[in-house]
Amino acid sequence: MKQFKPFQLTYSAKEPGVLREALSGWGISKRTLASVKYSGGQILVNGNEVTVRHVLKKDDAVTVIFPNEELGEGLIAETGPLNIVYEDQALLIVDKPPLQNTIPSREHPSGSLANIVAMHFKENEIPATLHIATRLDRDTSGLVCIAKNRHIHHMLSMQQQGKTMVRRYDALVHGKFAEKKFKITEPIGRKDSSIIEREVREDGQFAETEVEVLQEFDTFSYVQLQLNTGRTHQIRVHLSHIGHPLLGDDLYGGKRDDIPRQALHCKSLELIHPVSGDELSFTSPLNKDMDEMIHVKR
């Protein structure tokens, strides 16, 4: 089997101290350390392999060599269109069309974004599995962020928790609004009668969505939303809760008279690159069906 060059990162010790503590400060999680230790990775200090108990000196060069990852056996690599917005050794940002699963499901076992990305990794000899940091529902179109290894995924998750990753969505929703800019802060949990549906409930997880009305039409509004948390179905549940469900979202009270899918699009994504520290910003144009509705109604 061909051996691919593993992903690695090098850090400089700013002060003396135990290596384990320095690694934690650089965002290396305990789970990642375990994979390095038991799955073929290495930790080097000034080119020499050491354990996490090693005592660092100021300016020591610490290199973490992460073990190569393999795609899960259940994920079949499939050929298909893939709209790549950005790619480097750590990240893959793609623009997902509507009516495509992010990952395979029982109802749609093939043709998902994950299936196609798996083929992209295979064809380009990228020794990685899929770590999808910003999953979208099947109906939702727009930007999806994928990490190429466990450590990068952890770093992106930390950004989401710290709100340094910003996702904005465009949506078409039923009705008009009294306020043009506001926040919805309501806890979300699973509905007792369903394994799929979520609802606003007192014992749910904290969830916050910012809403700005961009345009209003006779029966619907064009809004921009910013997720400050990442709960399942958050936008759909919050909008339905305040009486303005997404057009096409019949699971949460929307009607499909004008559009056959939930009218939701991940328009922009801002994040800090987990390796370089650079600020990255990406945008995606509205899908044709939503764009035509806005222009026809003007």
Image: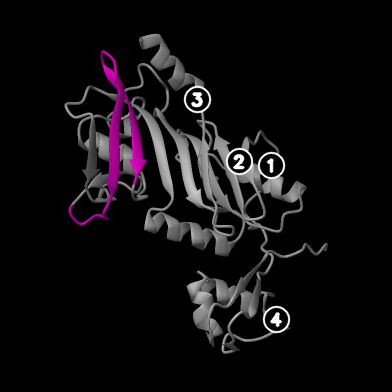
- 150 and 257: which is toward the camera: 150
Nearer mark to the viewer, of 3 and 2? 3
Which residue in the protein does label 4 denote? 46
- Quarter of the image where one finds residue 39: bottom right
Which residue in the protein does label 3 denote? 287
Indicate left or right for 197 with 65 as reference.
left
Quadrant where the N terminus is found in the figure: bottom right
What kind of secondary structure does the magenta stretch mostly adopt?
Answer: strand
What x and y, as percent, mark residue 149? 60, 60
Marks 3 & 4, CB-CB < 8 Å contact: no
Q: Say what amino acid the circle numbered 1 marks.
A: Glu
- Quarter of the image where one finds residue 260: top left
**Label 2: how many Cα within 10 Å (few below 14, some 14–19, many 20+):** some
**Label 4: how many Cα within 10 Å (few below 14, some 14–19, many 20+):** some
Which residue in the protein does label 2 denote? 110
Marks 2 & 4, CB-CB < 8 Å contact: no
Q: Disc 2 versus disc 1: distance between alpha carbons?
A: 8 Å
Which residue in the protein does label 1 denote? 78
Which badge, 3 or 2, comes first in the chain's sequence? Answer: 2
